[in-house]
Amino acid sequence: MSETIPQQFWQGVEQFNLGQFYDCHDTLEALWIEASEPEKSFYQGVLQIAVALYHLGNRNWRGAVILLGEGSNRLRRYPSSYSGIDVDKLLDQSTTLLKTLQQTGSEKITTSEIDVNQALPRIVLTNDE
């Protein structure tokens, strides 16, 4: 892990937590393109979850389910705390939302029968890096 986390990353975290998922994707994608491993896959996992939530906000069940799964699988490679982020908490929240979406099905999303904002994942910071 790099000793210094770029300011852009923290901007992306703030955008994620404010529900600005499209902006978060743009911010983290710029980092992801330039990064090397292991940060590259970490940024990609977070931005895939952000894009999943963007899709969910647009009632795109399929896009949300696919990207929640891909982003979660990518982040499972990292320790519980990575780059100051509580990875376990983000994974738990993302997995819970994914299971809810899978059980609910696309029909309920497209007809707005569930509250998609009720259990949106948030990025929680840790005290250690």
Image (cartoon, helix red, strand yellow):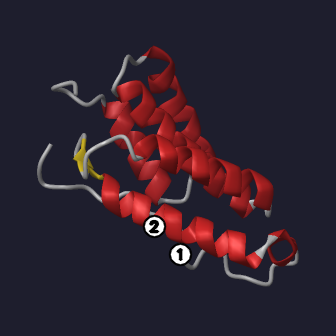
Give the Cα distance between marks 2 and 1: 8 Å
Residue wearing tag 1 = 119
Residue toward you, 32 or 9 = 32
Q: Which residue is mark 2?
A: 93
Q: Is residue 98 above or below residue 117?
A: above
Q: Quadrant of residue 104?
A: bottom right
Give the residue drawn at x 44%, y 30%.
Answer: 41
**Three-letter amino acid code at the position of disc 1:** Ala
Q: Is residue 29 above or below residue 106?
A: above
Q: Indicate which disc, 2 or 1, sits on the residue closer to the N terminus.
A: 2
Q: Position of residue 32 (x, y in %)?
A: 47, 25
Q: Secondary structure at mark 2?
A: helix
Q: Is residue 12 above or below residue 39?
A: below
Q: Are marks 2 and 1 in contact (CB under 8 Å)?
A: yes
Foreground: 62 or 14? 62
Name the residue type under label 2.
Answer: Gln
Residue occupying the point 69% across, 57% down:
65
Q: Residue furthest left?
A: 128
Q: Residue at horizontal 39%, vertical 41%?
A: 11
Q: Position of residue 87 (x, y in %)?
A: 33, 53
Locate the C terminus and report the quarter of the image it occupies: top left
